[in-house]
Amino acid sequence: MKYQLLATDMDGTLLDDKKDLSSENIRALEKAHHSGMIVAICTGRPIHTVIPYLSQINFPCWLITNNGAVIRNPQQEIIETCYISDTSLEQVIAILRQDPALYFHGSNEKQTYINSRMERLKSLYRFERKSHKGHVKSFLKAMEATWLSKDYQVVDFKRFVSSGYQLTNIIAISSNTELLELKRSQMIQMNDVFVTRSGNDNLEILDHKATKGNALEKLAQRLKIPREKTVAIGDHDNDISMLAYAGVGIAVENATLSLKKHADLVVCTNNHHAVDDALKEING
């Protein structure tokens, strides 16, 4: 077999702009699996937002979630977790709390923590609207996820951290790109954090060892798969390390220019079944 391990990003890659998983991509993944290829879903999402999609794929996948900070086997058992250090976590939260209008949330391998359900509702509504859903449908989905889901816990972040709780990653979301850049410039001065983004309206903060690329390397080593037998496909800057590690790095057409610079191959957009296109390209 030419390639043995496929790592695919979710949002903007495997999923279309409506956040749907196409039947073409599902069939492509299943065909790869049946041919002996191991499939890993590599995403910035926490596990509870990935599980609904797994039910559509008729075989168990390896999972790299929280932007590389958590690795799970096909039985969804945790293999490895990489937390932000206590000192850095305190610093990051202090920087983000300087602007009360800036929404952020933190995750670990168990759930996601928020400081305000109302701010979470606003953020989720904007996220749903980006999926080209109508106002009412976007609002209802955001309401359901904010108030009915048990996966989001409201906390006082300052007290949360001082009590010894740990986080794998923090995501700050704002349409104010200048504010995000200011926060990024402050945090990149810290030695042991990694600051990236999965969209133009966010910042993602992790431990410096927690990248998709490092997680993919660990997974390949665990499975005894040579680097040159791995394939990675993504769309944004948080996928750069993954493409850089893989034997073949693939960018979707809608990817950032910075990611495309690291790609060996560019395929169609995420709205035209990019994973299916990528697998056809590499398998000839």
Image: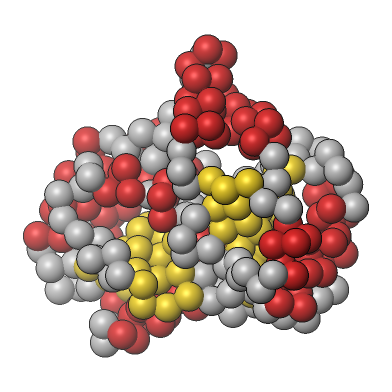
- Residue at image coords 70%, 46%: 115
The answer to whether 264 is drawn above or below residue 173 in the figure is below
Look at the image and tell me in which quarter the N terminus lies. Answer: bottom left
Query: Furthest residue to the left?
Result: 34
Name the one closer to the observer, 149 or 19: 149
Which of the pair 164/224 is nearer the observer? Answer: 164
The residue located at (41%, 65%) in the rendering is: 64
How many numbered marks does the figure carry? 0
Q: How is the image coloured?
A: secondary structure
Residue 205, given in percent of the width and then of the height, sits at 68, 63
Tell whether 221 sits left or right of 256.
left
Q: Is residue 126 visible?
A: yes
Residue 66 % position (x, y): 51, 61
Name the spot of residue 74 as percent of width and height, x first: 24, 66
Front one among 128 and 230: 128
Q: Relative to 161, is 79 above or below?
A: below
Residue 67 in the figure: left or right of residue 266: right
214 above or below 279? below
Q: Residue at x 33, y 49 (%)?
A: 51
Position in image of residue 56 (x %, y %): 22, 42
Does residue 128 appear in this view? no
User: Quick check: 220 left or right of 258?
Assistant: left
**Image quarter of the C terminus:** bottom left
Task: Using the rendered view, name the quadrant where residue 25 is placed.
Answer: top left
Quadrant in the picture for residue 183: bottom right
Q: Residue at x 47, y 32 (%)?
A: 148
